[in-house]
Amino acid sequence: MQQLRFDREEIVWQEVPGEVSLAFLCSGCPLRCQGCHSSGSWKAGRGAVLSEDYLRSRLQQYRGLISCVLFMGGEWHGALLEGMLRIAREEGLHTCLYTGLERNELSASLLPHLTYLKTGRWLPKRGGLNNPATNQQFTDLRSGANLNHLFQGETL
């Protein structure tokens, strides 16, 4: 039986601009991007199981304090991740996925459950979202707007 596992759980403020996010760093990433800051999470089976009951308990604990649930990875278990996204949305929260894949490489069934999406492999020479030369893109899926400028200290 497949299980979605996470290596780290944190409350974060910077990864999704304007949101206080409960973030899960999912383990088992098959992409293995050179220079990845989370290479410790590559190993499949590492960390705790992220069950629906566990997620619901965390959302209950943080009710009124968080506005978003962020999954860093997990798209390789699309059906399991989709279930977690549904739970977050049912609780009235925004959702975000950080992935090294491009949007067209993701399961189309995930997209309707996401508010925000960060796509693109980590390329050390291009940097992350805070670098104007990055290949990565942070998108508000409600409007389709590219929000990279929010990571680069620019305003609209």
Image (cartoon, grey):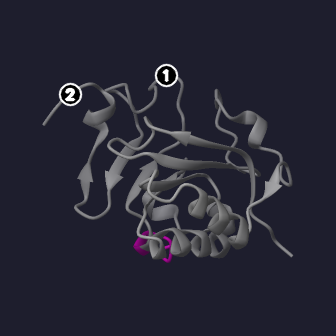
Instruction: Look at mark 2 in the image and give the residue it sits on.
Output: 154
20 over 135 or under it: above or below: below
Instruction: Look at mark 1 in the image and give the residue it sits on.
Output: 125
Horizontal and vertical percent for residue 83? Answer: 60, 75
Horizontal and vertical percent for residue 29? Answer: 71, 50
Which residue is painted at 72% across and 65% down in the image?
Answer: 54
In magenta stretch: residue 17: no
* The N terminus sits in image quarter: bottom right
Which residue is painted at 47% across and 76% down in the image?
Answer: 90
Image quadrant in which you'd find residue 135:
top left
Q: Are marks 1 and 2 in contact (CB under 8 Å)?
A: no
Circle 1 or circle 2, nearest the eye: 2
31 over 93 or under it: above or below: above
Image quadrant in which you'd find residue 58:
bottom right
Of the residues shown, which amino acid type is indicated by label 2?
A: Glu
Classified by dominant secondary structure, the portion drawn in magenta counts as loop
Q: Which residues are magenta?
A: 108-112
109 over 99 or under it: above or below: below
Q: Between residues 130 and 60, which one lies in front from this camera angle?
A: 60
Give neighbour class at mark 1: few <14, some 14-19, many 20+ (Cα, 10 Å): few
Which residue is painted at 45% across and 55% down in the image?
Answer: 68
Image quadrant in which you'd find residue 149:
top left
Q: Between residues 115 and 105, which one lies in front from this camera angle?
A: 115
